[in-house]
Amino acid sequence: MPTKLNLASKPFSNRSLPWVVTTVIIVVSLICLVFIVRSTGRANAQAAVVQKDINDLKQQELNLRKQADAIRNSLTTEQLQTLAAAHTLVDRKHFSWSRLFADIESVLPGTVRVKRIAVRGVTTRGEETLADLELTVVAKTPATVTEMIAEMDRGGVFHAELRSQTLSRGRGETGAEYELAVICRPRAGSATESVATTPPTASDVASGAIR
């Protein structure tokens, strides 16, 4: 049987295969490009919506600030004082004065007596209520007061600083009077108790509410 020979210069070549592969690659690339363009468009659209919301919120905040400033400027000095007093009253109603008495009792040495408590102010910072107090105590020795101040700081409820010291002049009294500036920071959960909502007065101390 005779053998058939391929005498072409480039035998057994397929010229259409490279074009098919190239075409497939181009089509896949175009599909990926379209997908990327659409994804980018959606992301840009979402970013534009978010930015618009942010701009709207900033504009609302600016308008509210302008309204607040306008209202504040329209109030008289007397009205501003009344407003500040109302805020102070609200803050005081959120402060547990009975808890304050108990906390002071817990840090007082047996030889120290409270003579006067004055409330300079009550403020609210976030969820924390702080009371600014003037505390006058009577003690026989400065070392006792120093130890009491250290104990108050260690407890974390009070931060006390000694302001002045005056010798006691009452009949039968010994020692000295010490005036302290005290910041009271109630423990979590005790600032909103409603056991006592009025600040202590001199009569409270004199009647023995605090020794």
Image (cartoon, rainbow, N blue to C red):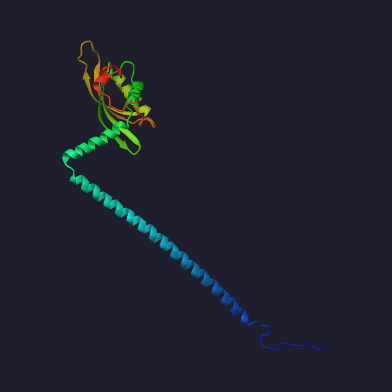
- Residue 129, given in percent of the width and then of the height, sits at 32, 34
Quarter of the image for residue 210 reads top left
Q: Quadrant of the C terminus?
A: top left
Q: In this rendering, does residue 137 appear at all?
A: no
Asked if one can make out residue 47 in the rendered structure from this viewpoint, the answer is yes
Give the answer, above or below, for where 50 lies relative to 181.
below
Residue beneath the point at 21% across and 45% down? 72
Which residue is depicted at the point 60% across and 78% down? 20
41 up-or-down from 99: above or below: below
Q: Quadrant of residue 184?
A: top left
Q: Is residue 79 above or below residue 15?
A: above
Q: Quadrant of residue 84?
A: top left
* Left or right of 7 in this view: 53: left
Asked whether 53 or 175 is in front, the reply is 53
Nearest the viewer among 112 and 6 is 112
State the residue in front, 26 or 149: 26
Residue at 16% from the left image edge and 40% from the top image edge = 77
Q: Quadrant of the N terminus?
A: bottom right
